[in-house]
Image (tube, rainbow, N blue to C red):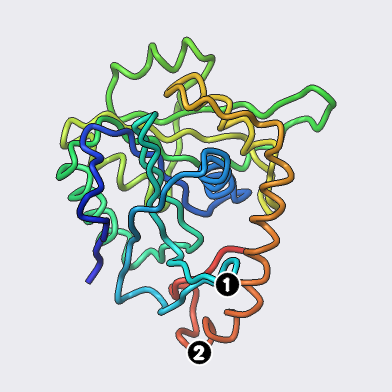
Amino acid sequence: MTRINIQEDAQIDGYTLIEGFPGVGLVGTLAAGYMVESKNMEQIGYLHSEKLQPLILIHDGKTQFPIRIYRDKEKKIVVLLSELIIPSKIVEEVSEELLRFIKKHKIKEVISLGGIAKPYQEKKNSMPEVQAIISKEELRDRLEKENISLVPEGLVVGLSGVLVAKTEKENIPAMILLAQSRKNIPDLKASAKLVEKLNKLVDIDISTKDLKEEAEKIEGRIKKIVGQTRKIQESYSKDNESPTMYG
């Protein structure tokens, strides 16, 4: 069973949901994690599934679920931050639970963060391009004003793509923001570019000046977790369908 659990007194009706799951360049997770740290967001819940590995993270001596939910009351934003890859065999189940959560709380808009494996020039003032996938045509003009083009053709693999497809059927505005990213290493520049675009799209008012330092802290923590859980992962499954921490 997959379930989102949040505090009973957490009032989030009408909020914008921003989700960051690990993927290309760890861009989504790093950007979402930096938002949470920068705004000192309040944790209000977590996502739990019996089909995921029974892992609990330790950070500063405290236990944490690997998929957590945070709130910024001032900006009316909910952030879903995952440090765990959702295996393909339960993407459908998790997306259905997320959709239930979105509908229950009358979420105003869904924004998924991720990277796209597309090289960019590593020059002093160059920044990755950001493209988008949308669920509703009315979002196009808003994105074009921020110089965000739409992905013309292609495939989206994983939870974010399935979730946007489901929100389209429910007439819920949703988009995936994809920053050009290096594929095999954490891309801090791509994460910063996503945060900059979010500043304009939803007015979250977050400086990216300290993103590198904070993201490196997050990256270091995750690398430790990966090392500690590698043997556990191997014991759970002999194939790549097992839930895995990103690394």
Closer to us: 14 or 124: 14
Disc 1: CA contacts within 10 A as few (<14), some (14-19) or many (>=20)? few
Q: Quadrant of the C terminus?
A: bottom right
**Residue 158 rendering spot, x and y as whole percentages:** 41, 53
Which residue: 40% across, 48% down? 70
Q: Is residue 1 left or right of residue 114?
A: left
Disc 2 element: helix
**Residue 67 rendering spot, x and y as whole percentages:** 42, 60
Residue where numbered disc 1 is placed: 61
**Residue 230 rendering spot, x and y as whole percentages:** 60, 80
Sequence-first disc among 2 and 1: 1
Residue where numbered disc 2 is placed: 235
Closer to us: 48 or 172: 48
Q: Looking at this rendering, what residue extends furthest in the bottom direction?
A: 235
Which residue: 35% across, 29% down? 134
Q: Is residue 9 left or right of residue 52?
A: left
Closer to viewer: mark 2 or mark 1: 1
Mark 1 is on which residue type?
Gly
Relative to 136, is 103 above or below? Answer: below
Relative to 214, is 133 above or below? Answer: above
Q: Would you identify the image quadrant in which residue 37 lies?
A: top right
Relative to 123, is 67 above or below? Answer: below
Q: Quadrant of the N terminus?
A: bottom left
Q: CA distance from mark 2 to mark 1?
A: 26 Å
Which residue: 64% across, 55% down? 218
